[in-house]
Image (tube, coloured by chain):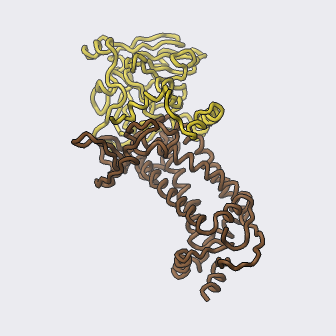
Chain colours: A brown, B yellow
């Protein structure tokens, strides 16, 4: 009974495992979606890794217009040496320090030497401290992020992708429908065809929330942009707030990617990959 | 032992002997590197298009100023500078030369006697931190107008008294930023004479760019038609030794 309800509610199909019926190939993703997805995956990977390298240059975050070493930081990555001469790394959030030796604050380089770096080399681009090179990569790929997102949103508006696939209907906004989708996810029952409400929320949140926030807060870090568009700082609450939001936005993107990949794995990764590469996938879920 | 990032920054410029991961091999691959650096050529024209010549950096109120304004980079000049500092820069003068009609030697008293601009602005270090301070001095454009630019003038170079491993600090900007109303030769900071660690007697303030462009300990202002042939040829100390972008607006 529940399944029928879901069927009408989400205009999609509920995965029926082991149905044994030969499943035909169905159209899944448009070319524009597939192109943007893979270009963006690369762009975001490069921007995240080079961004972490840039963060390593000053691993402290503040709220407001200014913030430097003498000002209180709400988040700080650091390294210290104890009385026995042993080095430690840690993260201090709102005055509470958590030891993260080996990963954050203190890690080992390729030659085994201890390095006082906020994020370890294996997470950053390049893997060794090079602020200038990381900035070159970050800023070059920022064009790909901004131009790519603008073009994709515009095209998705024109071809109806936003209206048809991402628009959350009034019925879907109801707590009951959201609760239904949560329960389905907990039971590992995934919607095939049309997106479920949680999926729409996640994708719309990234497209219209997180990525625009990353672009706006990134632009606000540029002193030239601040002269050209001072309202950016008014909206974001000052340059150091913008820097904090830029970092928190990255945390949001990382969370999205982790959940996104987990969902792909849980709902038949081969079939999902096929859908995002060729545009067609087997009807229903599973590999 | 913990290697400080500030130490490793210099140590890694040579880059030799380090085991580079696959990612790094791509990053350092000349074609890829050339493509990425080439994108940097887009940044300045795109930003200038949005910015125009005269858009001002935000100016703040006294209440918005940082309680402490940290000093960064070198905190003193060379021996000749130290001798001037010991005399309170009484016999010091700023040399203005290169592609100008009338080379000048301007003592500190002359700079103080010119029309002054006072501005409370945000200093943004390339590393990520910001500090808000008050700066005062004559507009660079005023000084350049006194000297009179030759028609071939393209860049203004600031030669500084501070050195790192024998390499003198220097910086350069184009004429758009040189004649920007907020570009000043600051001899005062936060209402008093520029402290020694902040670049006394005079430092550049070019408010729409990052901290490394704000040359301290400015001894000589040279007007040039090209940056080629000057030190490493990239227009600044950090540009030469660490590959920082010459245009520091981003």
Vertical comparison of A16 with A124: above or below: below
> In this image, B3 relative to B235: left or right?
left
Q: Position of residue B28 (x, y in %)?
A: 58, 33
The quadrant where residue A282 appears: bottom right
Q: Is residue A95 visible?
A: yes
Q: Position of residue A36 (x, y in %)?
A: 67, 54
Q: Nearer the viewer, residue A12 or A98?
A: A98
Q: Is residue B184 visible?
A: no
User: Of all residues shown, which one is farthest toward the bottom?
Assistant: A1
Q: Which residue is painted at 24% across and 15% down in the image?
A: B86
Vertical comparison of B213 with A138: above or below: above
> In this image, A38 relative to B21: left or right?
right
Q: Position of residue A104 (x, y in %)?
A: 39, 48
Vertical comparison of B118 with B143: above or below: below
The quadrant where residue B220 appears: top left
Q: Which residue is painted at 21% across and 42% down in the image?
A: A83
Vertical comparison of B159 with A239: above or below: above
> In this image, A154 relative to B132: left or right?
right
The quarter in which the N terminus of chain A is drawn is: bottom right
Q: Nearer the viewer, residue B77 or B19?
A: B19
> In this image, B85 relative to B149: left or right?
left
Q: Position of residue A29 (x, y in %)?
A: 71, 63
């Amino acid at each position: 009974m529940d399944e029928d309800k879901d069927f009408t509610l989400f205009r999609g199909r509920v995965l029926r495992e082991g149905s044994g019926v030969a499943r035909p190939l169905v159209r899944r993703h448009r070319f524009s979606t597939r192109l943007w997805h893979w270009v963006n995956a690369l762009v975001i990977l490069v921007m995240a890794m080079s961004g972490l390298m840039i963060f390593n240059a000053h691993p402290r975050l503040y709220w407001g217009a200014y913030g430097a070493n003498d000002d209180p930081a709400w988040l700080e990555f650091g390294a210290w040496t104890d009385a026995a001469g042993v080095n430690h790394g840690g993260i201090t959030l709102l005055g509470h320090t958590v030891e993260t030796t080996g990963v954050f604050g203190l890690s080992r380089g390729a030659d085994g030497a201890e390095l006082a770096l906020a994020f370890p080399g294996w997470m950053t681009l390049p893997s060794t401290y090079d602020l200038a090179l990381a900035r070159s990569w970050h800023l070059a790929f920022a064009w790909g992020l901004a131009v790519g997102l603008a073009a994709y949103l515009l095209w998705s508006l024109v071809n109806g992708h936003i209206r048809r696939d991402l628009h959350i209907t009034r019925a879907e906004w109801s707590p009951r429908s959201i609760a239904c989708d949560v329960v389905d996810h907990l039971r590992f029952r995934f919607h095939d065809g049309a997106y479920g409400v949680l999926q729409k929320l996640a994708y719309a949140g990234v497209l219209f929330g997180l990525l625009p926030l990353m672009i706006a807060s990134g632009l606000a870090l540029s002193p030239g942009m601040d002269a050209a568009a001072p309202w950016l700082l008014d909206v974001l609450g000052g340059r150091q707030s913008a820097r904090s939001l830029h970092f928190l936005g990255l945390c949001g993107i990382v969370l999205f990617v982790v959940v996104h990949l987990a969902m792909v794995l849980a709902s038949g990764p081969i079939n999902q990959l096929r859908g995002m590469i060729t545009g067609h996938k087997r009807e229903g879920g599973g590999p | 032992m913990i290697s400080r990032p500030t130490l490793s920054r210099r140590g890694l410029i040579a880059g030799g002997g380090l085991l580079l991961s696959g990612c790094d091999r791509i990053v350092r691959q000349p074609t890829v590197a050339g493509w990425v650096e080439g994108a940097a050529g887009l940044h300045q024209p795109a930003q200038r298009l949005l910015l125009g010549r005269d858009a001002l950096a935000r100016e703040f109120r006294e209440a918005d100023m940082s309680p402490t304004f940290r000093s960064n980079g070198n905190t003193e000049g060379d021996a000749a500078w130290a001798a001037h500092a010991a005399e309170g820069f009484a016999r010091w003068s700023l040399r203005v030369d290169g592609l100008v009609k009338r080379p000048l030697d301007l003592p500190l008293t002359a700079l103080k006697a010119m029309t002054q601009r006072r501005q409370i602005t945000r200093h943004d270090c390339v590393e990520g931190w910001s500090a808000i301070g008050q700066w005062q001095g004559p507009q660079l454009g005023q000084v350049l107008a006194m000297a009179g630019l030759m028609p071939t003038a393209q860049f203004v170079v600031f030669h500084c008294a501070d050195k790192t491993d024998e390499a003198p600090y220097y910086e350069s900007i184009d004429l758009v930023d040189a004649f920007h109303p907020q570009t000043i030769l600051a001899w005062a900071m936060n209402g008093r004479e520029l402290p020694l660690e902040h670049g006394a007697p005079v430092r550049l303030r070019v408010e729409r760019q990052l901290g490394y462009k704000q040359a301290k300990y400015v001894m000589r202002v040279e007007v040039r038609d090209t940056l080629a042939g000057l030190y490493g040829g990239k227009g600044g100390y950090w540009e030469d030794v660490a590959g920082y972008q010459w245009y520091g607006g981003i």
